[in-house]
Amino acid sequence: MSKPKSHRFDTLSLHAGSAPDAATGARATPIYQTASFVFPDSDHAAALFNMERAGHVYSRISNPTVAVLEERAAALEGGVGALGTASGQAALHLAIATLQGAGSHIVASRSLYGGSHNLLDYTLPRFGIETTFVDPRDIDAWRAAVRPNTRLFFGETLGNPGLDVLDIPRVSRVAHEQGVPLLVDSTFTTPWLMRPFDHGADLVLHSATKFLSGHGVVIGGVLVDSGRFDWDAGAARGKFPTLTEPYHGFHDMVFSEESTTAAFLLRARREGIRDFGACMSPFTAFQILQGIETLPVRMQRHVENTRKVVAFLDAHPLVEDVGYPELPGHPDHVLAKTLLPRGCGAVFSFNLRGTRAQGRKFIETLNLFSHLANVGDAKSLVIHPASTTHFRMSAEDLAKSGITEGTIRLSIGLEDPEDLTEDLGRALHAAGKT
Amino acid sequence: MRISVNGGECYAYTGFHRLDPAQPTIAFVHGAANDHSVWALQSRYFAHHGFNVLAVDLPAHGRSAGEACATVEAIADWIPALLDAAGVAQAALVGHSLGSLAVLACAARHPERVASVALIGPAAPMLVSDELLAAARDDELLAYEMIVGWSISAARQLGGNTVPGMWMTGSALRLMERTRPGVLHSDLTACQSYGNGLVDAAAVRCPVLAVVGGRDQMTPVKGARALLDTLAGVRVVTLQGAGHAMMAEQPDAVLDALRTFLQASPRR
């Protein structure tokens, strides 16, 4: 008996989760644009509702097209399963709401996407969930922030917008010492650049709007479970009653007994998606699946282009500094070599020398770069964080996150890199004359 | 539920129901380096359809304490102790892989305790390759990858899980990774060293169902042939396209085979 072979990443990005449609032979994953699914008979219906048989009931809870995406995301991340959500924000909320309620606490990196910061700092306290934000590079700060009611650690693989590289091995070790899981937002890196589960993370979320779909045409999120965290054991004991105690909302099911490795996903689907309803549409799932099919080749080109643009900007006299972990001056340069050997993604920030007016002139002179609030598009994008994505943050918090009035964030697309550097050079020249 | 079996704490999934003395009981016995959760859909169905269910974690597996049973015969003798602890006089036994050997041996050694047996993915002898045994001894993570690679059919390794959103390969691997050190090697050695399969099969008098996977590489159909030929009156269901992990690959087909068999078998 020869040793079995497992499929590699590029193959899984095309095939995982899918099969030619049994009814029609369609090679592409069909868009099952239906709200509901017909039951063969009453017994079968009851068995589906009671989780005695597998299948689909209602597209808010599960849908065949979305399920293909969920399976593919889990395969690429090396998890046990996944849930598609209406957005990346919905995935973050779903993760939190599945694990904890009023009176609980989160320790999070302070270098987060502005939307995530809003949810944790302004919205969740209204529902009794507090967050302590820490410098993601300060491992002792993570530990010191833990309270008896802490239920989750949260950070981004590459912090926003300074690209702090989350030291997942060390942060996850602290989390596990405290009996809590580490949730990682892996939107900027995608599993092609890094699989957080390989380094100790327990849960991963993506805004699939970004590189996974890759073309800026859909809003969607994915939440993946590694299946490794033991909700019952050791330091975690008693901390996660949503998973380890009977749930009256589903026949007194104890999710950690029902499924040894997928208790979190079971609860997230049977309660979170069911009750909060932030599900993904089948058409959105189809678009994201199309994107993932080319994820490996796109990410490779994104990174190659980014390196050329970073080198151009780093050498330009009107640029104060460039924050990209592959540059020797970046604080996480060494860590990035270990955790992100394929590259540090295609989103980064730089600081212009000069006034706010010069910054505005720079952005308005760009032709190929689109000025908008998004990243991870095939087309190159630009934004001024202080006035857009992070505008709700105080000046002090902005400074802590490494953002100044002159900070410009770029998302490098798949255009010819010479055209991109020419566009940037033209805009910098115009800004210099302002 | 947690019960004490032979002085060791044992876990058995019951579908979160109390055992009803008026109902027949089914005991589900998992395979090597697995636990009760491999029966999730099937055990939950029966727990809600007129049966008591005891989907056990064998000693040293899953949530159960103690040392792993070193032989198939030891598991076979442990099952009546489980039934004693649960207050069950007789049960239908359903076993997968190593568990199929255990329930077969139990039916032969303790016929008064066994109403019927269902063998899922059986073979006798159940040969284990030297390569896998060595990996189980020296590099358990490699051994888990080998087993998962051989247990799930090629088509299902790419996807198409009937449970929405679940990656079958990842789920199977992660479950095995939870196994305590040394347990997989003990389980595989138990399979390899069980030489009484055909003798025990000839001694079984209760109704027997065998479910085999058409694409099972761990216990291929041809490896089960001698056993099936020895079992008197065995009902055989072949799941075309299914690998060894057939409860996950074709959960409804396994359930339907069990329903037909168990609901037709005499209830004592």
Image: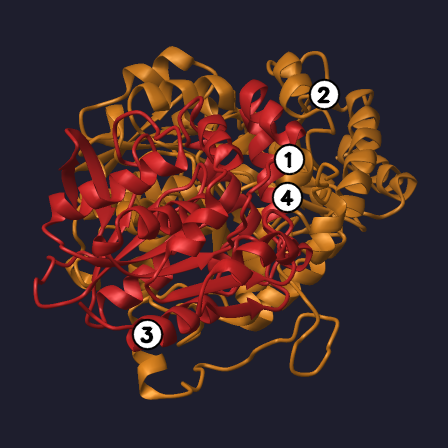
Chain colours: A orange, B red
Q: Amino acid at mark 4?
A: Gly
Q: Is residue B150 left or right of residue A41?
A: right
Instruction: Tell me the residue at 91%/39% (across/down).
Output: A418
Kindly report which numbered mark, 4 or 2, lies closer to the viewer in this rendering. 4
The answer to whether any part of residue A20 appears in the image is yes
Expressed as whole percent of the image width and height from the top left, the position of residue A370 reads 71, 52
Q: Are marks 4 and 1 in contact (CB under 8 Å)?
A: no
Q: Amino acid at mark 2?
A: Glu
Alpha carbon distance from label 3 to label 4: 30 Å
From the viewer's perspective, is the residue at label 3 or at label 4 nearer?
A: 4
CB atoms of marks 4 and 2 within 8 Å: no
Please give left or right for residue B177 compared with residue A357 in the image: left
- Provide the chain ID for the residue under circle 3: A
Residue placed under numbered mark 4 in the picture: B149
Parent chain of label 2: A
Q: Which mark is residue A326?
A: 2
Upstream in sequence: badge 3 or badge 2: 3
In the rendering, at what x and y percent does residue A401 appear?
48, 26
Q: Is residue A405 visible?
A: no
First along the sequence among labels 1 and 2: 2
- Secondary structure beneath dot 2 equals loop
Q: Residue A116: x and y, percent?
A: 42, 42
How many angstroms separate mark 1 from mark 2 (CA)? Answer: 18 Å
The amino acid on which the numbered mark 3 sits, given as a three-letter code, is: Ala
Q: Which residue is mark 1?
A: A408
The Cα–Cα distance between marks 4 and 2, rounded to whole angstroms, is 37 Å
